[in-house]
Image: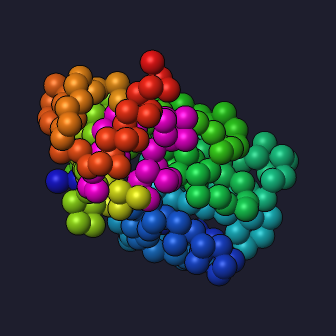
Amino acid sequence: MEQAISILIVEDEDIWVHNLTILLESYGFSVARAVSTVNDALTAFSSCNYDLVLMDINLDSRGGGIELGKVLDKMYNKPFIFVTSGDFHDVKDAAAANPSAYLTKPVSPNSLFVAIQNAFNNFSSNRQSPGKIAEESFSFFFVKQGNKYKKIEWKDVVYISSQKNYVSVFNAPDKAEYLIRSSLQKTMQHIVPRSMHNQFVQVNRAEVVQLSFVNEITSDEVRTSYKNFPISESGGKELRSMLKNVL
């Protein structure tokens, strides 16, 4: 079963810690711990169970986070994201620590999610981050399975289904469902990339289908090669309207 990806926050501004925690949890991530000093961060690196570190560059003093980044890179082999204040000089100096991604304050929901996905992608591909992450389109997301991270392309997601505190996404290439700890509404608003919003349609209260996988629409059902879905009146109207726009 999939587990929530766990984030360690290294940040000395309480308001940022609070805001980041809310945003991370809204995306289905868990916060392993939040620390505010270099010494506490070094302790957390070795004692805390985490998948990725979100770290302020200017911790304790200007550039304090950069030295921590070098420790993470050399000793712990963990992906980490530098949070910057927008100073290009910081980013240039930070490159020596080999961060997996950058994030600029103020942190927006979309840029945070994109930065985390890019961090895992760069880390798994042994690529250095090319620079700051803006609010941009992205085509994939990662789920955690044990000690591994699986990359799923949104173009391969047939449907998204609500299941209590989770949503499941069905991945066509391996014909398997994967869980995201989020609601259907939040998944559609924040996790599905903006560039693909017009490809997914909610066909009933609990299910969303990608248009490219729809084979047939009847009066009460949407049919794909993998599963058929009951269709609500409002879902049918929206689906036919969206299909008309893409044909």
Position of residue 210 in the picture relative to residue 219 (left or right): right
Vertical side of 23 occupied by 83: above or below: above
Q: Which x, y percent locates residue 238?
A: 40, 41
In this picture, which residue range is highlighted in magenta? 186-210
Residue 81 appears in the rendering? no
Q: Which x, y percent locates residue 77?
A: 44, 47
Q: Quadrant of residue 148?
A: top left
Vertical side of 121 occupied by 90: above or below: below
Pick whichever, 139 or 55, lies toward us.
139
Q: Residue at x 84, y 52 (%)?
A: 87
Residue 167 appears in the rendering? yes
The residue lying furthest to the bottom in this view is 14
Position of residue 81 in the picture relative to residue 25 (left or right): right
The residue lying furthest to the top in this view is 247
Q: Residue at x 45, y 44 (%)?
A: 192
Is residue 188 a member of the stretch shown in magenta? Answer: yes
Report the quarter where the C terminus lies.
top left
Q: Which x, y percent locates residue 82?
A: 64, 54
Position of residue 39 in the picture relative to residue 63 (left or right): left
Is residue 77 a member of the stretch shown in magenta? Answer: no
Protein image colouring: rainbow
Q: Quadrant of residue 177?
A: top left
Pick whichever, 163 or 8, lies toward us.
163
Q: Which x, y percent locates residue 100?
A: 56, 43
Q: Residue at x 57, y 68 (%)?
A: 20
